[in-house]
Amino acid sequence: MIEDVVRTLGFLCMGSRLRRIGERLQADTQQVIDEAGLGIQAGQYPFLAAIDRAGPLTIGELAQAVGITQPGATRTIGQLLELGYVDMQPAPDDQRRRLVSLTDKGQDLVDHSKKVIWPRIAAAVADLCGDLDGPILEQLAAIEDGLAAVPLARRNAGKEENS
Amino acid sequence: MIEDVVRTLGFLCMGSRLRRIGERLQADTQQVIDEAGLGIQAGQYPFLAAIDRAGPLTIGELAQAVGITQPGATRTIGQLLELGYVDMQPAPDDQRRRLVSLTDKGQDLVDHSKKVIWPRIAAAVADLCGDLDGPILEQLAAIEDGLAAVPLARRNAGKEENS
DNA sequence: ATTTAATCTATAACACGTTATATAACACCC
DNA sequence: GGGTGTTATATAACGTGTTATAGATTAAAT
């Protein structure tokens, strides 16, 4: 039996570990989506949800809403365009900005997902995480906020102020 | 101000969120490594640490130890070979297996990292996460174990046993 | 002993994130 | 009003994970 070093090393490999768990979770989520016969990738959902919640958004706003960089948003929106779930047109007042909106097909997908798929996924993840001592979502929020406030490289934990 | 949908959607986007935080953490960790003048990627460390802890390991064992797939391990070991931190030779009893061991240079890097870099990173991450209510590392372990025991797709949270 | 199946590593093709940079449109200033 | 800087999106190149599959070696079976 080989030791799981990432787990053993604890805080040292926290980044690798979070990513690894996230990838696993997302792969499992994808399986739920596939079993439901939806033709969409798990990573595309947040984009649709963002537009559903806030109305048409630009590429830049979508990137911000989903928390990735602009080129990543451009690519994913390109896929959703191909799939016919969203539509894109230049903003009337500023030709640089492209407003991305849901098509009827996209809205249908969102509506259906909200009823059938999303609750199921959220319930399954809650079932997985919900009973843990600390409310994990708040802890993640605290970590994100903490990183934004003071990046890791500036945290010396009061140990060595490197002379 | 654009809403962070991944955060807003909570458990539904837990996978995306963990991955996102992990990527951020690892990028910050990389910065610490770079500032120390080490010529290595954060993601390569677990491989060196695994060999340091357990002695020479095969590609498959390394993949298992680090928690990624075998092709990923093959690639990373290829990089570490190029960098001269590890050595690889066929196992004497089984020509299919390749035993990966630390070179002197690799051992030096590990020894130095153990003294200087790893404690600093671990302390910084602990500073970031340590004060949270629940011990986050144990919660992550519980999530990993939970996923391994019952995959997400089989967790219906007792709601609908799909007739 | 030769064929067949299983195991281990390597390679190819892809997914999806990143950084760096090019291009187009707007905003400002002289 | 034409140059200059800024902003928004697109594209290129790369990093690192994945799945699928090929190749080589070992183990098993007839």
Image (cartoon, coloured by chain):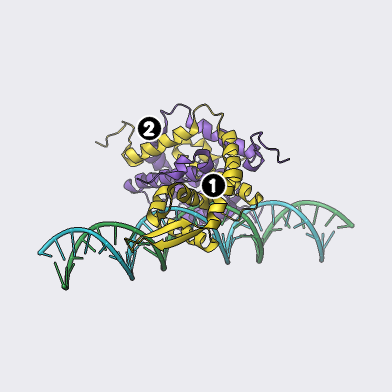
Chain colours: A purple, B yellow, C green, D cyan
Residue at which label 1 appears: B23
Question: Mark 1 to mark 2: distance in Å?
Answer: 25 Å
Question: Do we see residue A64 in this rendering?
Answer: no
Neighbour tally class for label 1: few under 14, some 14-19, many 20 plus, Cα within 10 Å: some
Question: Do we see residue B7 in this rendering?
Answer: yes
Would residue B125 appear left or right of A20 to someone viewing this image? right
Nearer-the-camera pick, A147 or B94: B94
Nearer-the-camera pick, B82 or A38: B82
Element marked by disc 2: helix
Nearer-the-camera pick, A89 or B141: B141
Would residue A161 appear left or right of D2 to someone viewing this image? left
Numbered disc 2: what chain?
A
Residue at which label 2 appears: A127
Element marked by disc 1: helix
Above or below residue B77? Residue B17 is above
Is label 1 or label 2 in front? 1
Above or below residue A134? Residue A150 is below
Which x, y percent locates residue A144? 57, 38
Which x, y percent locates residue A34? 35, 48
Dot 1 and dot 2 residues touching (CB under 8 Å): no
Neighbour tally class for label 2: few under 14, some 14-19, many 20 plus, Cα within 10 Å: some
Which x, y percent locates residue B148? 35, 41
Amino acid type shown at disc 1: Glu
Which x, y percent locates residue B79? 51, 60
Amino acid type shown at disc 2: Asp
Q: In which quarter of the image is the C terminus of chain B?
A: top left
Q: Residue at x 42, y 33 (%)?
A: A129
Q: In which quarter of the image is the N terminus of chain B?
A: top right
Nearer-the-camera pick, B9 or C11: C11
- Where, by quadrant of the figure, is residue A88 drawn? bottom right
